[in-house]
Image (cartoon, coloured by chain):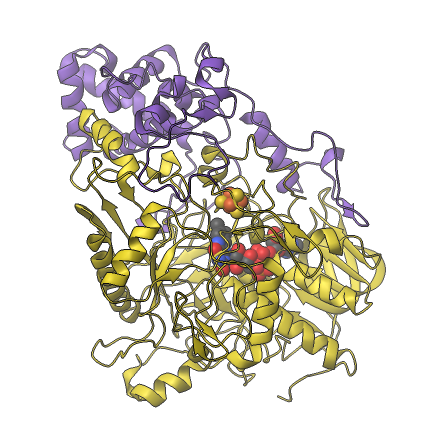
Chain colours: A yellow, B purple
């Protein structure tokens, strides 16, 4: 039996980006807040100091900072006729674990979504007609608009010190920025990062082809910055050990660098690590959360009661905890009823590697940062006329190479043997003159009726609970979108002067073994109708009004950008609704 | 790597299996926690006898390493670069045993894109794969793989890669693909793990290693970075064994 702990005002489940934001906001309101994080404490001085953090084998290949599948995993199948099998080792994505969550080992690519992304269904139907959309596509409007989120985007950017060049200042298009972005109220807090050689060359080639390239907005800072909480970040040193690694330099925006040192000093905040929440408890009415039950590292169960529950365990785990706690009606694709697990999406990723003449090009490709890069946005969202192309959606393309750690980045031109003297010579000749953008084509992934999450019928976790089951495939719309974007991207890499290209398209079936970003979305989506969404526009549960669910699980579908700036902005938006409306009058903020 | 992984494993996961006092959940309040030596630097691989391979397996692996990465005038071959030692220590450690992976039954065959679905970890695959390779060579040539002439070795591996040489009870092509991947990884991982000896892999390609600061270099385009590589244990000259 779980032992009971003294009641708190607020319990926070999971201490990553959104957990940290919510803790700071709600403690500012004077509430007594406790946060539980299943993974260990982590920070630069001890867990990732310069000296042994630069270890590709340990952190990239063996995933040291991530969740171990034996603690919790998922099952996967492509479609409802297939038997789902457990993901025994990670591939397509890499679930975070530990204080700071994904904020520790992310790249820091910080994109705003387009204004039209938030009203996608309405926008596309108006422009192209409902018949233009595939019949099984289940995209929706978000229930919140870009203009409503703008102040919260701004807040998160200024918390992080984001480095970038504005493209649209209060409606005026700015030279050198992204002309397609929505209007921003202020410039970026710090100027864009300087770009290494290959990134600069990409920008030049793109400009010559008539595009408007701009530096990728970055949470790896171009210069020292003091944020509104008084915390100082140092300039990034382009170490090239960023994505998958913690930053030893206090240069990458993370909960540790931008919130924690300030938050931890507040007397009304407590954090417990190595404590995994296994259930959100509800009272007999089913309409009120009473708190959570968690297991600590000695295996003991505890019950923490609270008036308000914030679920911030990362998209997939948010949905898994809702299903295990039986909150909200599980989605059934056959009858098209229920909501929890509906509209699950990922990101449509591909790339083009370019091999250049080593006598003319030396890229020093190991110089990079997690969110360095020159990008073009002409083919994102609805920035271009989709009419002639027969698909919807899009993405940005760019030279976003984050470094060139040698286990992963010793590429050889297509047609080279995979081993032996020719392989060895090709590795030697090409390492310094190869362009390897990684997620160079970063496309949207829209939602479909039969792409969803539910509970598996065979496989169990270590508590005997069913694993959550992922049913996902790539649809024609995304495959066409990717082909279009990848070909455009290849043209630019070629124009940079590449002699040979290795072009990789994203194709079906969806493959759980190859990495395609950890941008997982949906399953507990926000919206305007409780029949088709789990949360209202303030991220409040329709069924249990004292439960708020953060994270990209709220995205009704995934636009062609990285999620976290929007995830953070939504957290601030939700926190502001809690502070200004909910606490005054606890209950539903929107009538169902 | 064993100790390292085990500690982190205790700290991070498997909370029901272990109850060591040092890894108890902690309440963090008032200040950022600081514990001396809380970090977890990797121990250096000790050179010397094989830890996982038998003598025969080790000879086969050294021979494989030299076929995959042949020595030449400028750079060490896979054997002298320690690639087989690297693989040996990896297989003896958590990687070999699939530590931390989800290993609950039932084990069912699935589609390739559903990922590895076997109780067998890399250690067992190597044990079976190397034995089957030697058996196949004995049948054909009357010798183990390591004893074959250079030409015959290449012929065997080429056939294996193309699926023309079948191994008994083992998927030869995917076993060989795994060996290629692991041996090449040994050439490029930090020398602390037993391969990339003398930083030969890094020197070969012009990778400066575990450096941390390129601020002065980000704007210097198309210029060769002049400094030699360093590893976690320092410069190659300081750590040559
Ligand atoms: C390698 C990598 C690179 C990325 N790069 C980018 C990028 O460049 N740009 C971008 O926009 N996004 C990026 N992301 C995504 C980004 O990390 C996430 O969007 C972001 O961290 C989400 O914030 P969150 O608060 O929802 O979840 P997280 O930050 O992941 O935090 C969730 C926390 O909850 C904990 N938790 C889970 N379940 C429980 C439980 N039951 N009990 C207690 N605690 C629990 C987890 O351990 C975790 O610490 C990247 C992700 C990865 C993995
Ligand atoms: S690239 Fe910059 S931000 Fe990233 S880990 Fe290195 S120093 Fe930190």
Front residue of B89 and A4: B89
Q: Position of residue A161 (x, y in %)?
A: 58, 58
Residue B216, horizontal then vertical, whole percent: 46, 39
Q: Is residue A518 visible?
A: yes
Report the front residue among B23 and A322.
B23
Count of numbered badges drawn on the protein: 0
Q: Is residue A530 left or right of residue B141?
A: right
**Which residue occupies the foreground of this view, A46 or A298?**
A46
Q: In this view, does A365 lie above or below B236?
A: below
Asked if residue B146 lies left or right of residue A219, the reply is left
Residue shown at the point (49%, 14%) measured from the top left = B238
Instruction: Name above or below for residue A502 compared with residue A576.
Output: above
The reply to whether residue B165 is visible in this rendering is no
- Name the residue rendered at 44%, 20% in the picture: B194
Position above or below: A388 against B67: below
**Ligand 1 falls in quadrant:** bottom right
Q: Residue at the location (83% across, 59% down)?
A: A268
Res A591 quadrant in image: bottom right
On the image, the x and y values in percent for residue B192 come to 48, 22
Give the vertical position of A249 relative to A135 (above or below): above
Coordinates of residue A173 in the picture (x, y in percent): 41, 75
Position of A506 compared to A121: left or right?
A: left
């Amino acid at each position: 039996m779980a032992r009971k702990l003294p009641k708190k005002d607020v319990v926070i489940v999971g201490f990553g980006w959104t957990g940290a934001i919510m803790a700071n906001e709600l403690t500012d309101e004077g509430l007594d807040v406790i946060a539980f994080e299943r993974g260990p404490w982590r920070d630069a001085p001890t867990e990732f100091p310069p000296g042994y953090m630069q270890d590709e084998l340990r952190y990239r290949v063996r995933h040291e900072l991530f969740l171990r599948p034996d603690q919790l995993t998922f099952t996967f199948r492509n479609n409802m006729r297939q038997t789902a099998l457990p993901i025994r080792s990670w591939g397509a994505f890499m679930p975070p674990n530990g204080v700071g969550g994904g904020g520790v080992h992310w790249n820091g690519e910080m994109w705003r979504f387009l204004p039209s992304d938030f009203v996608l269904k309405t926008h596309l139907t108006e422009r192209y007609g409902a018949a233009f959309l595939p019949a099984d596509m289940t995209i929706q409007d978000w229930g919140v608009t870009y203009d409503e989120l703008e102040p919260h985007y701004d807040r998160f950017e200024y918390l992080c010190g984001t480095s970038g060049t504005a493209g649209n200042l209060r409606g005026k298009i700015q030279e050198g920025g992204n002309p397609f972005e929505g209007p921003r109220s202020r410039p970026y807090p710090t100027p864009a990062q300087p770009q290494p050689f290959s990134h600069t060359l990409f920008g030049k080639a793109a400009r010559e082809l008539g595009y408007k390239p701009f530096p990728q907005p970055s949470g790896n800072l171009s210069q020292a910055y003091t944020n509104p909480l008084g915390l100082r970040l140092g300039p990034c040193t382009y170490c090239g050990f960023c994505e998958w690694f913690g930053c030893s330099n206090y240069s990458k925006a993370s909960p540790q660098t931008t919130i924690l040192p300030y938050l931890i000093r507040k007397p009304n905040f407590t954090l417990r690590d190595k404590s995994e929440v296994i259930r959100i408890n509800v009272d007999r009415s089913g309409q009120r959360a009473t708190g959570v039950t968690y297991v600590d590292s000695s295996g003991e169960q505890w019950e923490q009661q609270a008036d308000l529950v914030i679920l911030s365990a990362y998209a997939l785990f948010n949905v898994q905890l809702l299903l295990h706690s039986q909150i909200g009606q599980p989605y059934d694709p056959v009858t098209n009823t229920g909501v929890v697990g509906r509209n699950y999406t990922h990101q449509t990723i591909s790339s083009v590697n370019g091999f250049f003449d080593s006598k003319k090009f030396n890229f020093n490709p190991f110089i990079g940062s997690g969110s360095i890069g020159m990008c073009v946005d002409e083919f994102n969202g609805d920035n271009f006329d989709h009419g002639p192309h027969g698909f919807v959606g899009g993405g940005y393309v760019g030279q976003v190479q984050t470094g060139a750690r040698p286990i992963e980045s010793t590429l050889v031109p297509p047609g080279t043997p995979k081993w032996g003297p020719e392989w060895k010579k090709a590795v030697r000749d090409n390492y310094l003159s190869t362009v390897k953008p990684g997620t160079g084509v970063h496309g949207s992934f829209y939602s479909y009726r039969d792409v969803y999450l539910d509970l598996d019928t065979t496989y169990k976790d270590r508590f005997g609970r069913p694993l959550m089951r992922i049913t996902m495939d790539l649809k024609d719309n995304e495959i066409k979108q990717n082909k279009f974007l990848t070909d455009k991207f290849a043209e630019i890499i070629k124009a940079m002067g590449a002699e040979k290209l290795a072009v990789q398209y994203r194709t079906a079936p969806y493959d759980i073994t190859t990495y395609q970003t950890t941008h997982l979305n949906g399953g507990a989506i926000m919206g305007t109708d409780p029949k088709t969404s789990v949360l209202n526009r303030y991220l409040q549960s329709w069924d249990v009004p004292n439960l708020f669910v953060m994270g990209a699980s709220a995205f009704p579908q995934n636009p062609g950008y990285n999620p976290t700036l929007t995830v953070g902005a939504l957290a601030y938006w939700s926190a502001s609704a809690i502070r200004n409306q909910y606490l005054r009058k606890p209950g539903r903020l929107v009538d169902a | 790597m064993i100790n390292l992984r085990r500690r982190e494993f205790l700290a991070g996961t498997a909370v029901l299996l272990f109850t060591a006092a040092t890894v108890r959940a902690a309440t963090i309040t008032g200040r950022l926690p600081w514990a001396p030596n809380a970090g977890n630097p990797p121990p250096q691989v000790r050179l010397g006898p094989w830890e996982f391979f038998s003598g025969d397996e080790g000879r086969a692996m050294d021979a494989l390493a030299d076929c995959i990465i042949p020595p030449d005038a400028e750079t060490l071959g896979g054997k002298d670069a320690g690639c087989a030692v690297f693989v040996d220590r990896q297989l003896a450690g958590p990687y070999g045993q699939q530590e931390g992976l989800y290993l609950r039954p039932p084990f069912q065959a699935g589609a390739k894109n559903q990922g590895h679905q076997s109780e067998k970890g890399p250690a067992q695959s190597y044990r079976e794969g190397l034995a089957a390779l030697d058996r196949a060579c004995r049948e054909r040539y009357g010798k183990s793989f390591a004893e074959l002439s250079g030409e015959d070795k290449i012929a065997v591996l080429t056939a294996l890669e193309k699926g023309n040489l079948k191994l008994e009870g083992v998927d030869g092509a995917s076993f060989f693909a795994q060996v290629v991947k692991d041996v090449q990884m040994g050439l490029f991982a930090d020398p602390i793990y037993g391969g990339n000896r003398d930083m030969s892999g890094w020197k070969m390609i012009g990778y400066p290693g575990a450096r941390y600061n390129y601020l002065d270099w980000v704007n210097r385009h198309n210029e060769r970075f002049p400094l030699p590589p360093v590893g976690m244990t320092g410069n190659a000259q300081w750590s040559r064994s």
